[in-house]
């Protein structure tokens, strides 16, 4: 055995002699340097880091590759900077080996500090190839890693990051909504990155995001599209007018307004106005508005429902359907005959009129239609049969005197007042009976003949069913 022969790497390896192996890293023969680096990989001696880093500058590419392998095997924060720098090695094989080391090994290092440092370093050198691992890292369990990855993606500036960033932002917003807590820092960083990346170049990416399953993702996308503010985004925003989520349709319509898009009186115009809940203007776009109005009816509040029914009336809608929406429409138009034809599905619409229509004649008609459907209601009339008789007389032939006589006869027969005891009837301005005046001049409302409403203060207010005049309020 020669005294100054080459170091015996297998022997050093077998003895786990890291000092000997580190010394061998500087041996003149490249094959020895490679073997020493490879032997050091599983030993992971902290002392080996600096000599292995120095080997990344070796003039022999195979040696540099072995050093990359040994450093990658060790992992951890200390190897991040030298390995990321080696991504720009002059030799393609070294670069490939380093890419695997950095993207696969360091970006999934068990130490979050190493993952974070790697993401940050990749952003600094604007490593375009790093987008895929960085996109994975924006879902990292550790917040500081997520932040570093987002910032790196912003620094690299490639639009492929747009959709993943929108998804991250949406997830943070969902977390905030669901649990009331989210990472504000991640939200802010993702927003800032999107501010930087969302421009005309990213329209294609944003179009892809518009087809995402999650409504929150689509909502953010529509807002981002609107902010690009060039005519090219109009098509995407118009497509979003068909979104299944009404909030997104509204955001898209607002975005279209922001970029100066002008609706025409056609189907697209109808969709635009419907998205903004401008039902009258929707109807002005013609018959194609009908299906939109009908489809929106179930999802809006009472006030908007009235607007929709009005808009459908504007379009002279003649529904063939015999469903609840058609019944609401016919009730709105005062076509009680059509409501009765529809039958059971009309009961809800008729009840709504009976409960809350401000015109008592409509309430009376709805009560009559409900009776025709074998659905008599006790409120808001005590004796609907008497009310209907009285209205019939009032609306019938004959002069004022004749009608008063007929009404008095009917009321006496129905024991609503007693002329023989000196009582008389007092009349509403419209000619409908209002109160009974007793012989002692005390007035009592003819409650059986009036419509009534229970107030929240536990009082009952009576109304003239003919002209809606408030008659009197009685505490109960
Ligand atoms: Zn009246």
Image (cartoon, grey):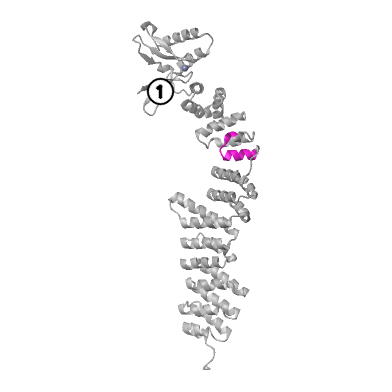
Q: Does the magenta stretch include residue 457?
A: no
Residue 404, position as x, y percentages in the image: 47, 9
Tell me the chief SS of the magenta region.
helix
The answer to whether residue 337 is seen in the rendering is yes
Quarter containing the C terminus: top left
The residue nearer to you, when weighing 425 against 30, is: 425
Q: Looking at the picture, does residue 146 appear above or below residue 76?
A: above
Answer with left or right where residue 382 lies relative to residue 169: left
The residue nearer to you, when weighing 250 against 417, is: 250
The residue nearer to you, when weighing 24 against 437, is: 437
Residue lying farthest to the bottom in this orientation:
2
Give the structural element (helix, strand or loop) at label 1: strand
Answer with left or right where residue 414 lies relative to residue 88: left
Residue 144, position as x, y percentages in the image: 47, 62
The residue nearer to you, when weighing 179 against 440, is: 440
Residue lying farthest to the top in this orientation:
420
Quick check: is the Cβ at mark 1 less than 8 Å away from ligand 1?
no
Residue 73, position as x, y percentages in the image: 51, 73
Residue at 61 percent across and 33 percent down: it is 283
Packing grade of label 1 (10 A; few <14, some 14-19, many >=20) is some
Q: Looking at the picture, does residue 378 appear above or below residue 63?
A: above
Residue at 36 percent across and 27 percent down: it is 458
The region drawn magenta spans 267-280
Q: Name the residue under label 1.
A: 461
Residue 465, position as x, y percentages in the image: 47, 19
Q: Looking at the picture, does residue 303 appear above or below residue 56?
A: above
Rendered image quadrant of residue 324: top right
Residue at 61 percent across and 51 percent down: it is 207
Q: Looking at the picture, does residue 459 appear above or below residue 116?
A: above
The answer to whether residue 183 is seen in the rendering is no
Q: Give the tally of numbered discs.
A: 1
């Amino acid at each position: 055995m020669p005294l100054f022969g080459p170091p015996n790497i297998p022997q050093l390896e077998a003895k786990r002699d890291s000092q000997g192996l580190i010394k061998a890293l500087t041996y003149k023969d490249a094959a020895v340097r490679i073997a020493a680096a490879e032997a050091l990989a599983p030993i992971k001696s902290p002392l080996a880091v600096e000599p292995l880093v120095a080997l990344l500058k070796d003039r022999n590419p195979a040696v540099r590759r072995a050093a990359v392998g040994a450093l990658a095997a060790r992992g951890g924060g200390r190897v991040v900077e030298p390995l990321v720098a080696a991504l720009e090695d002059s030799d393609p094989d070294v670069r490939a080996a380093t890419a695997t080391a950095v993207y696969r090994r360091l970006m999934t290092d068990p130490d979050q500090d190493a993952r974070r440092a790697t993401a940050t370093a990749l952003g600094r050198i604007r490593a375009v190839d790093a987008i895929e691992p960085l996109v994975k890292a924006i879902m990292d369990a550790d917040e500081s890693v997520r932040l570093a990855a987002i910032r790196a993606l912003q620094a690299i500036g490639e639009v492929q990051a747009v959709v993943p960033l929108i998804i991250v932002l949406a997830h943070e917003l969902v977390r905030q909504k669901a649990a009331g807590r989210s990472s504000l820092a991640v939200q802010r960083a993702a927003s800032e990155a999107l501010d930087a990346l969302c421009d005309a170049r990213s329209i294609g990416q944003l179009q892809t995001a518009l087809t995402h399953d999650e409504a929150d993702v689509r909502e953010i996308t529509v807002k981002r599209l609107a902010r690009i503010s060039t005519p090219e985004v109009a098509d995407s925003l118009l497509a979003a007018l068909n979104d299944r989520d009404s909030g997104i349709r509204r955001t898209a319509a607002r975005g279209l307004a922001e970029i100066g898009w002008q609706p025409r009186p056609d189907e697209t115009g109808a969709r635009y106005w419907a998205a903004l809940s401008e039902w009258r203007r929707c109807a002005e776009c013609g018959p194609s508005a009908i299906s939109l109005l009908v489809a929106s009816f179930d999802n809006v509040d009472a006030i908007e429902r009235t607007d929709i029914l009005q808009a459908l009336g504007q379009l002279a809608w003649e529904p063939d359907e015999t469903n609840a929406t058609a019944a609401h429409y016919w009730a709105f138009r005062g076509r009680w005959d059509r409501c009765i034809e529809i039958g059971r599905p009309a009961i809800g619409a008729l009840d709504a009129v009976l409960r809350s229509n401000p015109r008592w004649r409509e309430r009376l008609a709805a009560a009559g239609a409900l009776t025709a459907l074998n659905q008599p209601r006790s409120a808001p009339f005590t004796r609907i049969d008497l009310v209907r008789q009285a209205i019939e007389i009032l609306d019938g032939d004959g002069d004022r005197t004749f009608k008063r006589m007929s009404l008095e006869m009917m009321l006496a027969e129905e024991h609503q007042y007693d002329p023989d005891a000196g009582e008389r009837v007092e009349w509403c301005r419209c000619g409908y009976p209002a109160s009974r005046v007793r012989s002692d001049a005390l007035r009592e409302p003819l409650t059986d003949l009036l419509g009534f409403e229970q107030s929240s203060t536990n009082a009952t207010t009576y109304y003239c069913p003919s002209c809606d005049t408030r008659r009197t309020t009685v505490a109960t």
